[in-house]
Image (cartoon, rainbow, N blue to C red):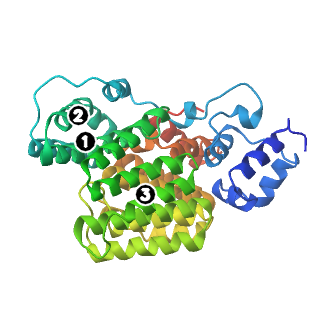
Amino acid sequence: MDPTTFGARLRAHRERAGKTRPALGGLVGRSAEWVKALENGRQLPPRLPMLLRLAEVLGISDLAALTGDQTLPVGSVTRAGHPAVEDVAAALRHTTLPVGPVTPVEVLRGLVGQAWELWHRSTTERTAVAAVLPGLLSEAQRSARQLDGLARRRALVELARVYHLAQLYLAHQPYPELVWLTADRAMLAAQDADDPAAIATAGWYYAHVYRGANQIDAAEQVLVDAAALVDPAASGEQLTRWGQAQLGIALGHGKAGRAGQAWRAWDAADGAASRLGSGYAHPWLMFGPAACATYAITIETDLCRPGEAVRRADTMDYRALPSCTRRAAALIEAARAHVLRRGEVAAVHLLGRALRESVDTVRHHPYARTAVLELSNRPSTVGEDARELALAIGVVG
């Protein structure tokens, strides 16, 4: 094939990403024949929303790698920067010891807990935590550096939790280097604390970054190592960390198209969640039966089984997730499943519900942004409603 054509570039990136034509087609809501027609030049390159979706699935950062035309960073459309991001970034980039009094560990734990509660309870979670995150980073860094002994180790655990929150704040924004920085610093803080549960949690968040970069095997290794640090026969925090590691492993296998391995790991996670109780949800990690149920929708969709994904989504009790941002993310995943099954009316409805749960989650979610762009082109009520959503989240086609 002529390497200068769109089809040849698409094929090269698909093969580099290790995806078959049916897998790629399924992930973007099209058939294997559609992908084949693009690669063979029998069909013209798709419009911008579908190009963006292809780029996201294949891990392409610049559309020029597909189109061969002038550069267009994928993140400039699919990822929106938060207005306060520079304040958070400045706090992360400090290399000198912040000046000020040392916050006692118990006080620090309370402040970190309040920040996590802001994240989960607010419909504009990024705006809410951005107001406290720079100061909280400084306080946690001071305590971790100036305290001694057991108090220092406990402060390091809280510092890791602050870095996890910063990672969530920075996710889906055009600053991938800052996301890597937070994941790395959280892992270092947890390791310095010599706290197995904290290290296991850091592995969960590090794996998110690896999966986002399509480094599935690296994500799995981090999670396998994390799970080995905690006892699945225990209860409470250790079982939560172990179950969450299994859930992360399941998500990686699902993204890679390994159905058997994905569901084995998911079954282990769901079993752990069931042992914790039918109504259990960890206060800030949110692991529990409801979280497992929502991630099952993601796995079914990634495995290109939209019918089963829709069945799970339609029976999901989203109110069982005590977090605005988690409910919004789950509704976006349900919308993704419906789009793959050509249920566009349901998809727009679910995206609207997600927006009511959390404006920030929808505004910064790459799939939600590309989906409303694509659905806006529909010549019907679906298109009109999608255009309203696009305006609400600041997406301009």
Q: Does 377 appear above or below 245?
A: above
- Residue at 80%, 59% in the rendered image: 33
- Residue at 16%, 36% in the rendered image: 143
Q: Where is residue 357 in the image (x, y as percent from the top left)?
A: 35, 49
Q: Position of residue 7 (x, y in %)?
A: 82, 44
Closest to the observer, 304 or 255: 255
* 160 horizontally vs 342: left or right: left
- Label 2 SS: helix
* 275 horizontally vs 175: left or right: left
Is label 2 in contact with label 1 (beta carbons under 8 Å)? yes
10 Å neighbourhood of mark 3: few (<14), some, or many (≥20)? many
- Residue at 32%, 73% in the rendered image: 232
Q: Quadrant of residue 128?
A: top left
Residue at image mark 2: 141
Q: Position of residue 197 (x, y in %)?
A: 28, 58
Task: Looking at the image, tell me whether mark 3 or mark 1 is earlier in sequence order.
Answer: 1
Find residue 330 and name its label. 3
Separation of marks 2 and 3 at Cα, in angstroms: 33 Å
- Label 3 SS: helix
* Residue type indicated by callout 1: Leu
Task: Looking at the image, tell me whether mark 2 or mark 3 is earlier in sequence order.
Answer: 2
* Viewer-side label of 3, 1: 1
- Residue at 69%, 55% in the rendered image: 18
Find residue 159 and name its label. 1
Separation of marks 3 and 1 at Cα, in angstroms: 28 Å
- Label 1 SS: helix
Task: Looking at the image, tell me whether mark 2 or mark 1 is earlier in sequence order.
Answer: 2
- Look at the image and tell me whether residue 328 can be seen: no
